[in-house]
Image (spheres, rainbow, N blue to C red):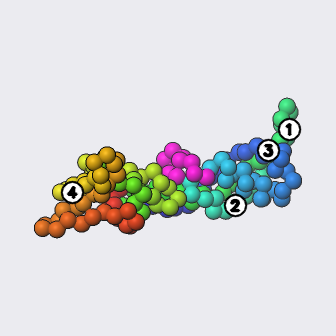
Amino acid sequence: MFYLSKIEHKLTLPPYLLTLPIREAILSELERLFLDKVIAKLGLCISVYDIISIKGGSVFPGDGAPTYLAVFNLIMFRPFTGDIITAKLIRSDANGLRLSLGFFDDIYIPKHHMPDPSHYVSTTSTSKTGTWYWDYGEESFAIGDSEEIKFAV
């Protein structure tokens, strides 16, 4: 689910970052480029773990900024099918549940993926919010607002 991914990236360092120590400036630029972005076949970037090496610093003709080749590790989030994840319930409506992992709030479980049998009860007739109930045997269990929910990817 979480793993380190070694990346080699050529980046141009903006002039306003040149007042900082080079490692700190490159870390700042890497965070701007990669944090909270989904990288194809790798997943969602959570953090820059470390910088392994920095090479270069060449200024090319017509460009006022130095270009560096950085090798670094990113902490990536990429759950696989079948992984069990614990999340907090943000919102419940007739269409399903919206969940949060803390660092990622865009998890949506549509009603057709809710446990079978389950049902939805609206709080008022005009309200768009309500509570989902999971029916197990003779009992109904409410999926409450501040509940932690485990779900399978």
Mark 4 sits on what residue? Answer: 118
Mark 1 sits on what residue? Answer: 64
Q: CA distance from mark 3 to mark 4?
A: 54 Å
Q: CA distance from mark 1 to mark 3?
A: 8 Å
Front label number (2 vs 3): 3
The kind of residue on which mark 2 rests is Ile
Give the residue at x 84% y 56%.
Answer: 20
The kind of residue on which mark 3 rests is Pro
Q: CA distance from mark 4 to mark 2?
A: 50 Å
Q: Secondary structure at mark 4?
A: strand
Mark 2 sits on what residue? Answer: 52
* Residue 66 counted in the magenta span: no
Image position, residue 27 (x, y; %): 72, 56
Q: Give 77 or 119, whichever is nearer the viewer.
A: 119
Front label number (3 vs 4): 4
Q: Secondary structure at mark 3?
A: loop
Q: CA distance from mark 2 to mark 3?
A: 21 Å
Give the residue at x 81% y 50%.
Answer: 17
Q: Which mark is residue 136?
A: none
Q: Give 108 or 14, whichever is nearer the viewer.
A: 108
Extreme top residue here?
62
Extreme front residue here?
125
Residue range of the region highlighted in magenta in the rendering: 35-44
Q: Secondary structure at mark 1?
A: loop
* Residue 42 counted in the magenta span: yes
Front label number (4 vs 1): 4
Mark closest to the chain's N terminus, 1 or 3 = 3
Q: Which mark is residue 14?
A: 3
The kind of residue on which mark 1 rests is Gly
The C terminus lies in quadrant: bottom left
